[in-house]
Image (cartoon, rainbow, N blue to C red):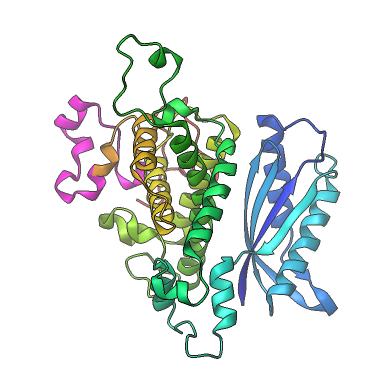
Amino acid sequence: MTYVVTVDAHISEGTPEMDPLQRAGAVALIGDGFDSVEAIEGPDGMEVDLLDSIVAVYPGGALLKVFVDAPALEFAEEAVRSVVGELLERSELLADWQIDRCEVELHPELAQESLAAADGPDAPPDDPADRKARHAERPTAEDDSDGYDAEAKAEAVRSQMLALADELRSFPPVMFGVPDDEDDEDEDGDIEFAVSPEDAKLAAGALVYATDILVDELFQDVQTLTEEDTTAAECDGPLWHFEDLPERYALQYDARFARRFLVTVIAMTTRFTDGSFQQLSCVAEELALKLLLNETNVTLETFGLLDDGVSAALDSFANNVYEDMDHEWLYDDSMDGIDESTVGAALGVAPMAFKAWFTPFNEGRYVHPSAADEPEGAAQ
């Protein structure tokens, strides 16, 4: 069975954070290390096949997603921990790094549901699409009668989101609509639609919380498209997010595109959290932010945390991060080709053809090398 093992590795305590050159070197060292491995020896000599890996490095360490074919979850985790530990030890730059986490991530509530109901009348549906729909449902009153405390869960998630807010280092509260000092001192004073610091903090934490969910679900989509060797338009299995991209290009959303889009999401959200974000870099990032905002709203609503104040904070965030909303035209077939028209030229619309999605808007924008455009002749 194929498993996706998440590995979180950190630089040693007291070590200065890595600068951009060191981070690039770490990506190369870890990536080259995985490229040299085809199979890993697991427990009791069990062979675990290494299928793929994705590496995202940030100033304090790296987040790895490792695809392996293993007979059991435990074998997958132990084998990956072993090979990652060996790769780190090989390099002088990485030798002091510590592995904080190495696990196949399962949503705790869904895992508990599956375990508790495995042989009972409430067993989860066999069909993956039915399971996806069931897992997307908001808890109901019936759940409360079976011991699910919706209020307690909502408060726990709210506390977790608030604790995560400080990780969104690139965006001060003013980006979420909180008045700055100059606004407070304005003689007119009253800002009717100002967002409170508490709502802004919850919105910021929700974005970080939703990032983890979005990345994990995109990994599942990548795996589904890879296993079926098909596109989002023709995929029989359930997809979390690629069906939410502009439908006119659904036949182009294959496993290769999905990997590039996933890397783009990781690169964009890494800049959100490491403090280096300045502007969205390309059309793919604009679409990635749209998915992240959707995921954030759904997550908040699921736990009953999406009130008017938090919604206003997220709207303010979107308005401040997006330079324009031209990417929304990709969802309107009547606007197809506007970027190549005289009207589009007059409006300054950036190229939005599918082949330009990963092209930086200008030389100052960053696109991850694993997602960047290939030479002419790549998929159109």
**Position of residue 87 measured from the top left corner of the image (x, y, whole percent):** 79, 53
Q: Which residue is depicted at the point 29% across and 43% down? A: 353
Which residues are the magenta region?
329-358
In the rendered image, is residue 237 in sight? no
Foreground: 329 or 107? Answer: 107
Q: Which residue is depicted at the point 19% across and 38% down? A: 338
Q: In this view, does 237 lie above or below 277?
A: below
The single residue placed furthest to the top in the displayed view is: 187
The quarter of the picture where residue 373 lies is top left
Q: Along the horizontal axis of the image, is 270 left or right of 337?
A: right
Magenta: main secondary structure equals helix
Foreground: 185 or 73? Answer: 185
Q: Is residue 302 above or below residue 135?
A: above
**Position of residue 274 measured from the top left corner of the image (x, y, whole percent):** 60, 34
The quarter of the picture where residue 355 lies is top left
Foreground: 113 or 40? Answer: 113
The quadrant in which the N terminus is found is bottom right
Q: Does the magenta stretch include residue 330?
A: yes
Q: Along the horizontal axis of the image, is 191 left or right of 296?
A: left
